Amino acid sequence: MGGRRVAVTTGVILGHVLLIWLLVVGHAPPPDGHPDNGAPIGLDLVGMEAASAHLSASKLSAVKPPAVKLDAVVATPSPDANPVLADIASSLPGLAAPDNTPVLSDADTQALSQFQPASAQIGAGPACNLTPAVVRDFSQNPVVRQGVSELPAAEKSVANAVQVWDGAWPQETLSGGKALLRGLLMREIAAAPADCLKQVNNGPVFFMVPDGAATVMVAVGSGQWTWGQLVE
């Protein structure tokens, strides 16, 4: 009996020791460096988002196409420029229309600066008539003959008049002899009283311009028009 009590007592004691050891080991913190040490895991989402945005911006800048200078498309057209490109450029929003300023040679620029238009002598009033003054200048002024002399021979045929304006300025009035004729018309209109610009013309106005031993017919206008439309 004494030996059995000792064995039972020893077993009970060992059982309690084992239970205590299991409880201690089960609640002990895991060693340092363990992936799950019981602490909450925080992700720096802000930092990741900034890095992602920086990466996206870097990728976009790497594949961004080179800037196209549209001012090369809409620059002053040369006499042989493609008019289709000018039409497309003028229709683009936010862009200026092509520059339609005539380009004159030094000799033509000097001649135009010395031109004294007869329209400056017209009296103001609703009955003023600009046409006779322009006809007189285009028939007698040597600067007009200078512009006509620069026209290609094929354009100065007896059968066809040289059309300078027919509701719009043709492309060929941007340079050469027609550019000088265009500049002369603009000077005539600028010097005339405002009331004269409202005068209505029906059909073209013809000018007989001496050209050496020949005479060249120059025409302005078509249908019903006013002198003021040349500067609109």
Image: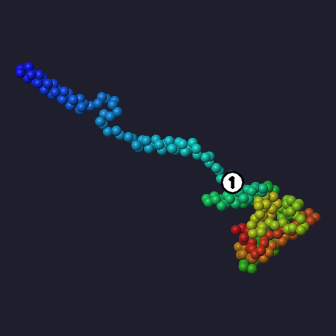
SS at mark 1 in the image: loop
Q: Residue furthest top?
A: 3
Amino acid type assigned to the residue bearing label 1 in the image: Val
Q: Is residue 79 left or right of residue 72?
A: right
Rendering quarter of residue 155: bottom right
Q: Nearer the viewer, residue 175 or 141?
A: 175
Tell me residue 49's x, y (percent). Answer: 44, 44
Q: Is residue 8 above or below residue 61?
A: above
Pinpoint residue 63: horizontal percent, then vertical percent.
Answer: 58, 44
Residue 167 in the image: state x and y as whole percent. 75, 69
Q: Residue at x 80, y 73 (%)?
A: 204
Say which of 117 and 15 sits in front: 15
Q: Residues within 10 Å of mark 1 (few under 14, many from 20)?
A: some
Res. 106 in view = yes
Residue name at image x 81 percent, y 67 percent: 163
Decide if residue 140 is in sight here.
no
Is residue 102 found left or right of 14 in the rendered image? Answer: right
Front-lying residue, 40 or 106: 40
Residue 89 image position (x, y, % from top left): 67, 58
Which residue is the site of mark 1?
A: 73
Residue that appears at 14% across and 24% down: 11
Q: Residue at x 6, y 20 (%)?
A: 2
Quadrant for residue 17, please give it. top left
Extreme right residue here? 213
